[in-house]
Amino acid sequence: MASATTKSDEKISDDPADWQTSTRTGGPVIDFVAKNFEGYRRYSSKRNILVQFYTQDSDLCKSLDPTWKELGAKFKDREDIAIAKVDAKSGEVKGVKIQSFPTIIFFPANYGEVIEYVGDRKLDALVQFLKEYDIVDLTSEDVPDED
């Protein structure tokens, strides 16, 4: 099957069956280009998706990476939510306006209205955001450790 190539030369398969394995980069975050993300949304319409739209040359995006990977690790075994990244320079995603980087957008299951996240970029704030939309039950394993 054909694949798209990101600027980092990582292959991102066009085959939906591969999206949960071959596109996980640096841990449990699914990394897409715009074309693949649109297909993933159709394929996984019952899954909530929290997406970071990023550019590889943005220092703010790079500084969010460790938190984003930690968030992905926290929810990697959940079937109802995916933590993802989309290379914003790879094309446009229908219904999404990107004005700055990184932009974080929540795509509710079943094509609900997309919500731009404008809160703090820390792990506990991102988990709390998901809780507000009844995506996460904050059990002891979902609550970030306090440092």
Image (cartoon, helix red, strand yellow):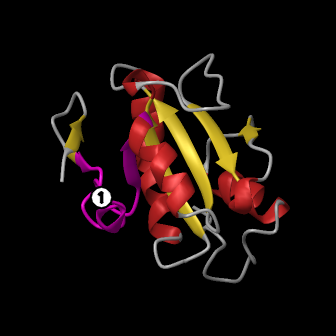
Q: Is residue 118 left or right of residue 40?
A: right
Nearest the camera: 85 or 114? Answer: 114
The count of marks equals 1
Please identify the quarter of the rendering in which residue 48 is found.
bottom right
Please identify the quarter of the rendering in which residue 65 is found.
top left
- The answer to whether one can see residue 108 in this image is no
**Mark 1 secondary-structure assignment:** loop
Q: Is residue 111 left or right of residue 35?
A: right
The residue that mark 1 highlights is: 15
Residue 110 pos. (x, y %): 72, 61
What residue lies at 55% left-to-right and 32% top-to-bottom? 93
What residue lies at 47% left-to-right and 54% top-to-bottom? 40
Please identify the quarter of the rendering in which residue 34 is found.
top left
Nearest the camera: 93 or 100? Answer: 93
Q: Residue furthest front?
A: 1
- The answer to whether one can see residue 124 in this image is yes
Q: Is residue 121 above or below residue 74?
A: above
Quadrant the N terminus occupies: bottom left
Q: Residue furthest top?
A: 99
Quadrant the C terminus occupies: bottom right
What residue lies at 76% left-to-right and 54% top-to-bottom? 129
What residue lies at 54% left-to-right and 29% top-to-bottom? 102
Residue 76 pos. (x, y %): 46, 72
Q: Is residue 121 above or below residue 20?
A: above
Q: Is residue 39 left or right of residue 22?
A: right
Residue 81 pos. (x, y %): 59, 67
Q: Residue furthest bottom?
A: 140
Label 1: how many Cα within 10 Å (few below 14, some 14–19, many 20+): few
| Magenta segment | 12-34
Residue 144 is one of the magenta-drawn residues = no
Residue 138 pos. (x, y %): 74, 76
